[in-house]
Structure formats: structure tokens, C-alpha cells
Image: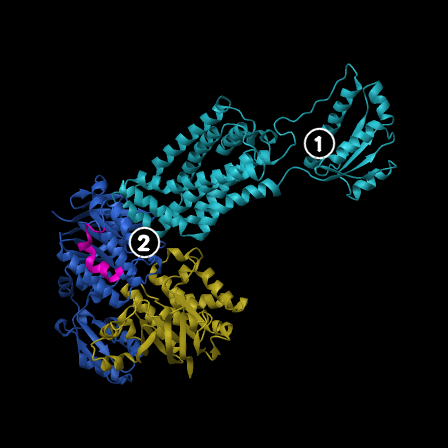
């Protein structure tokens, strides 16, 4: 036991004595969550919009006013002539043009069928569709209000209410993803690199030629990163709640449980890498290319999995982070309970078990 | 019981044969030197004996334990110092020692008497990081770490490479003390002058032993007539000596050149070589202060003769 | 003609004086042995002379150029080889030589014939396309030395060039050094083999950052009443106080 404790203490010394490792381990996750939460945002704010309104009645005015009040939109002005439409887009002054039909209010009240056209700059389809979605919601909301007042008995209201993320805040989606990324980075990359370092320095040779059981070498390597991962998890969650204002709707302990499971998977992956490589450089490259890139690209963090080619959709199923992020979104944002994430928990548990078994089997009791 | 037994050990890396079927035995309590240049197979041999590598074929045992089957018991009772001083550079002298003591389930206090002589020299720096030590001090720390669990057999792979002559001398003095405490020592070195400090040596080259014996016996078995030659122009002397037809080999050896004479040129074999004749020849080629005398061979002369 | 001159050269790192006021001069074509125990200050002194590190005080010239103010000129006129790094293992023999030629600005057209001539002289023609990593160590070191003087520098600095090399190859290596010295190249060499110290025209021995002895091996042996250079070295190095 003493053997094991001193060896674990040594791993902590390695980490605490290197300023850059410490920075990497504790500051990087914080930087990442802030960067992703604020900077790289997929939401659109302050979109300038213009109006073409031949009717100029109560209803159109109401819609314009509602839009103006919304934080996502800023009114640029009115277009008087349809010929101006193309020029105004080309000049890049606006991101959206709202075109009302003639006699808008009349139509709405009498036929219940008034026409609004939303024109957006399609060169960036993602942005365009987000903008039109926002605008449609605002218009639908106004329509709803109008109907309540108007006492019209039957009316089809287009309900495009967004579930769970009513304001479409992207931080909601980003937080679980960033946690997944940070945990993968720290557990897998740091474990494999520190193991490769011992091989490079030659200290591994001396430790192997000692009665220390290989399993203890592995566990004592992993413990510091396990502890640091938990610290990071708490940091990132605190930042998410207090700075990015993403609430934890679900059970906190369930969330921690799922995270611990994912940490095991990541540590096992790190160990697996370290059994395969001899140098720190290769360990680093393999971790970044083999682990981090898939987390960013294929886990659904950046791009929706449903939109990927079918082949990549299958590949995505193999990425542990995909299952983790899904489970985290369910628990943290939707507030679902354990029964809803049984599938994810099961998949992650199997992954952890398989990976740990393989890497312990592969851990060499000799040099090659 | 022999401390180390090696029989017909073979090991290749891809196409390169590092060990070509070597055999030798080491007695308990002796210093056995494995002497040869880089790439001769010394490190491969050490790694097989310390259970770090598997041989392709052959048998090896350490203190009665077979290296493959009983690797766990071997790991409990040997000390190993690899070629690079394998220390944690970012930990202090004391921390390094503590870690190595603990992985062998012992403490510094328990075996302090074993390392006392060596460790005392670096103890004033025990709070210093291992990475900041000089070469000689790193070497002493690495040896202390390898000794802390009172090993039965000590494996030292090139412990003196790149270390200056004075530190090397001190290091060998330490090994001698350890030998008197009953520890068997297997040590490899590329420095031929360290041979005389071993009880027995194996001269190794290209994965084969050229010879295994005591240094004295190896020297006594040297058969050639060996002469040392000096003149006022040493660089020219080397070239001129090589053109002499009676001379077999000629190499620079410090302040003189060592030359061996062809067997058929010796007077006893009906040849007409004599030191006087050689001196005359050289004098005719413009050399002055010529001094030629028969000398006793050193290990390096023997190695070069055997390696031919 | 003096090609290396050092006047009161000193290098301090904080409180620690690595090189303490050393003065010496090396003649053209001389083989100059630079000895000392580990940590005596050899490497630091050599770095200053190669223009890699600025002296704290004192003055030095190499090939007539000031080591502090004209370090770029100094670098053009010297060759350097160390045991730790000499050639790129994953490049072929000729690729290594072409690289050295290119670094020192030998004309493109001249490099090819020069490589062939060198390989012929060494008897290495058949190894032209061999990866350096598959050469025996003795060959590597010979090749590395040839690469270090490929651009015909005035001075070549050798940092423990023969560590771990087998006895015969070690001697062949020194014969290359003799040849270079005969061609007028000055050789500045450090070594831990005391028999190699005997091959030098003059030897300096550093102790605790200072040069404690400087003379021909013959005179040093006389002065210290020693049988060989090993004994001379031991007498001096035992005076060391630091470490």
C-alpha cells in the first residue's frame, strides 16, 4: 500500500511542478467553456432587417414593433420600392427583409390568411435558416396575441414553439459538449503522454524491473488525472450555471454519475494509447487526431449527426462522447431521469469495460 | 549456485542479429565485466537478464531463477541501472530515492547502511532536483536507487559512459566495496581500461564473445610480438611504419604507436626482423629520437587482435 | 598564426561562475586537447568560442573574429561535431553531406563532385545511398567528422567525438584528425579517453572553471612527475572543490 501511495504522490509532483501542465489542466477547460459559450456561438444577434409594407396597418405595425423589441433584430428601415430589394441585400446592410402583402390586416381578420414573406441572405444557409426561424416565431407569437383579443372562434395557429431551448440559446447545447471534450482531453491525452514520458526517460525500465505489479503502475498513473477531471467537471459546471446561465434542470448526482462513467472510458482510452506508443509526441498526436477530432466533429457537438452521410452516422455511434453528450443534454437541460438515459449509460459502461480489459491485457510486463 | 547462467542466447531485431548465441556464467560475489563497443549487444543482453526482453532462443537464469518463467522472483532481488540514468528529473534527490525504496517495499532507513558511502556524497544536495545534478552525481544517485533494496545481483549497463576519468575511478572504488559486501555485479563498459578492475571479463563484439577469462589470462594469452615505437614525428611515423613489410598492424596508442610483427618475419621463424633494422629504416626516412621497445600487451591490444 | 585567442574569458550564471577568467591561444593546424572533469566548465567555454553563448566578461577571437560581436562570421569559419548529435539518422549518407554543404553555402554544382571525392577518400562509395542509422558507430563518427570539415573550415570543434567507439575505429578516427591537422585545419577536441590526450599537440586541463595546466603532454607529464596523462589528470581533477 505504501508502495502505491508514494507512487501516486510522485504523479502529483510531476503535475504540480510543471507550470505548463498545470495551466493546461486547469486553465484550458475554463478558457474553452468561455470561448465556446460566448465566442463561437451559433446564435445570431442584432440582425439588421428591413420592411416592405404596402399596407401599413395595425397588424403590420404590431409585428414590426415586436420584432424591433427583440434582442435578435434591429430595424434598418423601410423599403419603398420592390426594385430596391436586390440592391439593399447586395450592399450587405441587412440580413432579413420582411415583405407584407397588401391589405394585410383585412386579410388576417376576414379570411385568416394573411401573407408574410421572409427573405434572407442565402449565402450562409445556416444563418439564414436561423434568422427566418426566429422571425417566424415572432410573427406567430404576435398572431397568437392578436387572436386572443380578436375573439375569433376558430383559427389555426401555427405553433412553432421551440422545446427546452425557447430562446435557442446555443450555450445550452455547447456546455455538455465542452465538458465531454475537456474530460476526453485531460484523461486520455495526459494519461497517455505521462506514460510515454516514462518510457522515453527510461524510468519505465527500472520500474518494470521491480516487484511493483503492473496494475498498480497503471492505477497510480490514472488517479491524479481522475481527481483533476472531477475538479474540472465542477469548474465547468459552475461556469455554465453562473456565467453562461445554463441551468442544471435534472438531478445533479445523476449528472455526476454519467460524467464519472465517461471519465473511466476516457482514462481507458488513454491507457490504450499508451500501450501502443513509445514517445510523448506520438501519444500527443494520436490523442488529438484519434480522440479530440472525433469528439469535435462526430459527436454532435458541432454538427448534427442526423445531417451526416450514413457512413459517418455509423462511425459516430462508436464515439463515446456522442453517448455522453446525449445523456448530458437529457439530464442537464431536459431534466430527464435515469430511466431515459439507460441506453447511453449501458453503452458507456460496455465501452469502459471493454477498453479497460484490452488496455490491461496489452500493458507490457516487458519492454516489447 | 552460479549467480548468472547464460546458454546459447540469441536475439534479433528485424534482420539485425544483436546476440548470436552467447554463453557464459558468473560466479557469486564477482565483478563480471562485459566489455565492447556500442552496438556489440551489451544492452540487449542486460535487458534479457533483467527480464525486460525475451530472447528468441537459449536459456538464461539469474540467482537460480529462469528469466522468462520466474521473472517475478528475479525482479524482487536484482538491482538495475540502465544506460541512461533513469531518474525523475523533476523530483529531488531524496524523493527519487524514496520512490525507488518504496516500489521495492523497503525504506531508506532500513537499508541506509548499504548506500551510506555513496549516498553521503550527494546527501548535501538532497533537496536539489535530480535534473540539476552533474553527471557524476546523477550516477551516484542512480546507483543508490539501484541498491536501496539490497539486491543479490546488480546489473549496471554502461554506468561510466561519458563520465570523466576521476568520477569513473570513484565509481569503480564503490563497486569494489559492494563486491566485498557479497553483491554479484555485472557491468558493461566501452572503456577497455576498466577491464583490470573486474574479476573476469567477456570481450564482446557483434553479438559474440571474443573471449571470456580473467584480465590477466587474456593478456598472458596474447601471442604476438608487440612493440611500442616513438619518434619526433608521430603522425608521419604511423604512415611510415605501415609501409614496413615486416609489420603486421600499427596503431596509435597514446604517446607511442603499438606495432605487431608478422610471424614469418621473426628471427625464430627464419625471418630477419630486428629492432635495430627497423630503427635504421626509420632513421633513413628522416625520423629522429627513435625509441622502439618490446612491451606487454594491454586489454585494448588483445581486443584489437581478437576482433580482427 | 593564432586562430583562437581567449583573454580572461568569463561566464557567470547568477552566483555560479562556470568559466573563470581563462586565457589561452591555439596555433593554426594545432590539435588542442581541452580536458576537464564533468562540470568543470568545458562545454560552456566551448559554446562561447563557437559563438553560441555570450561571455559575461573577457574577450575572445576565433579565426580573427570577435566571438561576441561577430558570432555569425565565427560560425561560418568553424566546423562542429559532438557525440550526441552528428548526422541525421533518417537521411542517406549523401543527403547528410549535401545538407551540410548547403548549410555552409557551398555552390550547388560543386557539392556533387565534392561528395563523391570525399566518399572515395574514405572508401565509402558503396554506402552513398545507405541510411545513416544502419551504419556501424565507428563509420558514423568518421562520416560525421568529414561532414564537419566538408566546408573546409579553419577550425573544427569536436565534443567527445569517440565515446563508445570500438578501439580500432577510434584510432582510425584519430588518423582522420591528423590528416585534417596536416592540411592546416585547427582541431579543438574534448575527450574522456586519456590516451587520446597524448595525441594532442597541447592539452589544457580545466578545474572548477579555470585552466589549471596547459602544455604539451610530454611537458605536463614531466611537470607532474606522472607516468601518463591519466595520472596528470587525476592529480589536477582531485583539486576540484565544487560538486
What span is colored magenta in the figure? Answer: B108-123
Q: Quadrant of the N terminus of chain A?
A: top left
**Colour representing chain B:** blue
Residue B37 in view in this figure:
no
Q: Which chain is yellow?
A: C
Image position of A196 (left or right of A95): left
Magenta stretch contains residue B114: yes
Residue linked to disc 2: B87
Q: Which residue lies at the image location 65% right of the left edge and 29% below the top edge?
A: A166
Dividing the picture into quadrants, the one containing residue A165 is top right
Return the x and y of residue A93 as percentages of the image width and height.
Answer: 78, 43
Q: Which residue lies at the image location 21% right of the left edge and 67% below the top edge?
A: B301
Residue C199 in view in this figure:
yes
Residue linked to disc 1: A134
Return the x and y of residue A159 as percentages of the image width and height.
Answer: 70, 22
Magenta span: chief secondary structure: helix
Residue C159 sits above or below residue A80 on the image: below
Dividing the picture into quadrants, the one containing residue A63 is top right
Residue B197 sits above or below residue B3 on the image: below
**Colour representing chain A:** cyan
Q: Quadrant of the C terminus of chain A?
A: top left
Magenta stretch contains residue A117: no
Amino acid at each position: 500500500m505504501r508502495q502505491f501511495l508514494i507512487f501516486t504522490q510522485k504523479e502529483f509532483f510531476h503535475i504540480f511542478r510543471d507550470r505548463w501542465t498545470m495551466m493546461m489542466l486547469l486553465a484550458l477547460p475554463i478558457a474553452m467553456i468561455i470561448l465556446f459559450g460566448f465566442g463561437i456561438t451559433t446564435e445570431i444577434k442584432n440582425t439588421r432587417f428591413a420592411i416592405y409594407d404596402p399596407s401599413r396597418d395595425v397588424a403590420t405595425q404590431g409585428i414590426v414593433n415586436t420584432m424591433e423589441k427583440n434582442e435578435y433584430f434591429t430595424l434598418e428601415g423601410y423599403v419603398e420600392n420592390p426594385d430596391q430589394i436586390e440592391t439593399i441585400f447586395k450592399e450587405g446592410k441587412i440580413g432579413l427583409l420582411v415583405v407584407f402583402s397588401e391589405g394585410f390586416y383585412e386579410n388576417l381578420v376576414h379570411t385568416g390568411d394573411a401573407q408574410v414573406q421572409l427573405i434572407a441572405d442565402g449565402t450562409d444557409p445556416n444563418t439564414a435558416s436561423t434568422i427566418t426561424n426566429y422571425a417566424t416565431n415572432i410573427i406567430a407569437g404576435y398572431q397568437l396575441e392578436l387572436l386572443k383579443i380578436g375573439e375569433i372562434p376558430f383559427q389555426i395557429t401555427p405553433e412553432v414553439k421551440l422545446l427546452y431551448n425557447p430562446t435557442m440559446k446555443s450555450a445550452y447545447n455547447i456546455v455538455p459538449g465542452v465538458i465531454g471534450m475537456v474530460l476526453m482531453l485531460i484523461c486520455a491525452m495526459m494519461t497517455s503522454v505521462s506514460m510515454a514520458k516514462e518510457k522515453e526517460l527510461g524510468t519505465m525500465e527500472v520500474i518494470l524491473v521491480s516487484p511493483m505489479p503492473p496494475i498498480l503502475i497503471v492505477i497510480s498513473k490514472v488517479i491524479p488525472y481522475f481527481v483533476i477531471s472531477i475538479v474540472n467537471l465542477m469548474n465547468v459546471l459552475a461556469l455554465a450555471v453562473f456565467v453562461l446561465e445554463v441551468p442544471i434542470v435534472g438531478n445533479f448526482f445523476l449528472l455526476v454519475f454519467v460524467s464519472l462513467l465517461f471519465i473511466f472510458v476516457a482514462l481507458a482510452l488513454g491507457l490504450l494509447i499508451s500501450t501502443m506508443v513509445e514517445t510523448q509526441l506520438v501519444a500527443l498526436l494520436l490523442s488529438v487526431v484519434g480522440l479530440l477530432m472525433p469528439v469535435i466533429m462526430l459527436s454532435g457537438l458541432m454538427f448534427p449527426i442526423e445531417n451526416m452521410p450514413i457512413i459517418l452516422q455509423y462511425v459516430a455511434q462508436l464515439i463515446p462522447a456522442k453517448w455522453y453528450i446525449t445523456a448530458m443534454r437529457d439530464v442537464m437541460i431536459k431534466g430527464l431521469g435515469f430511466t431515459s438515459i439507460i441506453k447511453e449509460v449501458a453503452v458507456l459502461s460496455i465501452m469502459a469495460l471493454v477498453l479497460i480489459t484490452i488496455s490491461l491485457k496489452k500493458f507490457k510486463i516487458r519492454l516489447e | 549456485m552460479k549467480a548468472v547462467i547464460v546458454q546459447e542466447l540469441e536475439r534479433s531485431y528485424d534482420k539485425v542479429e544483436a546476440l548470436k548465441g552467447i554463453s557464459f556464467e558468473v560466479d557469486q560475489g564477482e565483478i563480471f565485466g562485459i566489455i565492447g563497443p556500442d552496438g556489440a549487444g551489451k544492452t540487449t543482453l542486460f535487458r534479457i537478464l533483467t527480464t525486460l526482453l525475451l530472447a528468441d532462443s537459449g536459456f538464461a537464469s539469474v540467482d537460480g531463477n529462469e528469466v522468462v518463467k520466474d521473472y517475478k522472483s528475479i525482479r524482487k532481488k536484482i538491482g538495475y541501472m540502465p544506460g541512461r540514468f533513469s531518474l525523475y528529473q523533476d523530483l529531488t534527490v531524496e524523493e527519487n530515492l524514496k520512490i525507488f525504496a518504496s516500489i521495492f517495499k523497503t525504506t531508506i532507513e532500513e537499508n541506509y547502511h548499504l548506500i551510506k558511502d555513496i549516498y553521503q556524497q550527494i546527501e548535501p544536495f538532497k533537496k536539489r532536483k535530480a535534473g540539476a545534478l552533474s553527471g557524476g552525481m546523477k550516477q551516484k544517485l542512480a546507483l543508490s536507487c539501484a541498491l536501496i533494496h539490497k539486491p543479490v545481483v546488480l546489473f549496471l549497463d554502461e554506468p561510466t559512459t561519458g563520465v570523466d576519468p576521476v568520477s569513473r575511478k570513484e565509481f569503480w572504488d564503490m563497486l569494489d566495496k559492494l563486491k566485498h559486501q557479497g553483491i554479484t555485479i555485472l557491468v558493461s563498459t566501452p572503456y577497455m581500461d576498466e577491464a583490470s578492475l573486474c574479476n573476469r571479463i567477456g570481450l564482446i563484439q557483434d553479438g559474440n564473445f571474443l573471449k571470456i577469462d580473467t584480465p590477466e589470462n587474456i593478456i598472458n594469452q596474447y601471442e604476438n610480438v608487440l612493440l611500442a615505437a616513438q619518434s619526433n614525428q608521430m603522425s608521419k611515423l604511423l604512415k611510415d611504419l605501415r609501409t614496413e613489410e615486416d609489420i603486421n598492424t600499427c596503431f596509435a596508442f597514446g604517446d607511442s604507436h603499438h606495432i605487431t610483427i608478422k610471424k614469418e618475419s621473426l628471427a625464430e621463424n627464419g625471418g630477419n626482423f630486428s629492432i635495430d633494422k627497423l630503427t635504421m629504416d626509420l632513421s633513413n626516412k628522416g625520423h629522429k629520437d627513435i625509441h622502439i621497445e618490446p612491451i606487454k600487451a594491454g586489454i585494448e591490444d588483445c581486443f584489437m587482435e581478437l576482433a580482427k | 598564426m593564432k586562430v583562437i585567442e581567449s583573454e580572461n574569458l568569463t561566464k557567470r550564471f547568477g552566483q555560479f561562475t562556470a568559466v573563470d577568467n581563462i586565457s589561452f591561444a591555439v596555433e593554426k593546424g594545432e590539435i588542442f586537447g581541452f580536458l576537464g572533469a564533468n562540470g568543470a566548465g568545458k562545454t560552456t567555454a566551448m559554446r562561447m568560442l563557437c559563438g553560441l553563448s555570450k561571455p559575461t566578461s573577457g574577450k575572445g577571437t576565433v579565426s580573427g573574429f570577435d566571438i561576441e560581436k561577430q558570432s555569425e562570421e565565427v560560425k561560418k569559419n568553424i566546423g562542429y561535431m559532438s557525440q550526441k548529435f552528428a548526422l541525421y539518422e533518417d537521411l542517406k549518407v549523401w543527403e547528410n553531406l549535401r545538407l551540410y554543404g548547403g548549410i555552409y553555402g557551398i555552390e550547388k554544382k560543386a557539392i556533387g563532385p565534392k561528395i563523391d571525392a570525399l566518399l572515395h577518400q574514405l572508401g565509402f562509395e558503396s554506402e552513398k545511398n545507405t541510411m545513416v542509422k544502419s551504419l556501424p558507430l565507428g563509420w558514423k563518427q568518421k562520416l560525421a567528422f568529414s561532414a564537419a570539415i566538408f566546408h573546409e573550415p579553419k577550425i573544427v570543434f569536436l565534443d567527445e567525438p569517440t565515446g563508445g567507439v570500438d578501439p580500432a575505429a577510434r584510432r582510425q578516427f584519430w588518423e582522420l584528425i591528423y590528416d585534417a591537422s596536416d592540411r592546416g585545419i585547427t582541431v579543438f577536441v574534448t575527450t574522456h579517453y586519456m590516451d587520446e590526450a597524448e595525441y594532442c599537440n597541447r592539452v589544457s586541463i580545466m578545474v572548477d572553471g579555470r585552466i589549471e595546466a596547459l602544455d604539451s603532454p610530454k611537458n605536463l607529464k614531466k611537470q607532474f612527475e606522472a607516468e601518463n596523462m591519466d595520472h596528470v589528470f587525476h592529480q589536477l581533477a582531485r583539486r576540484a572543490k565544487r560538486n
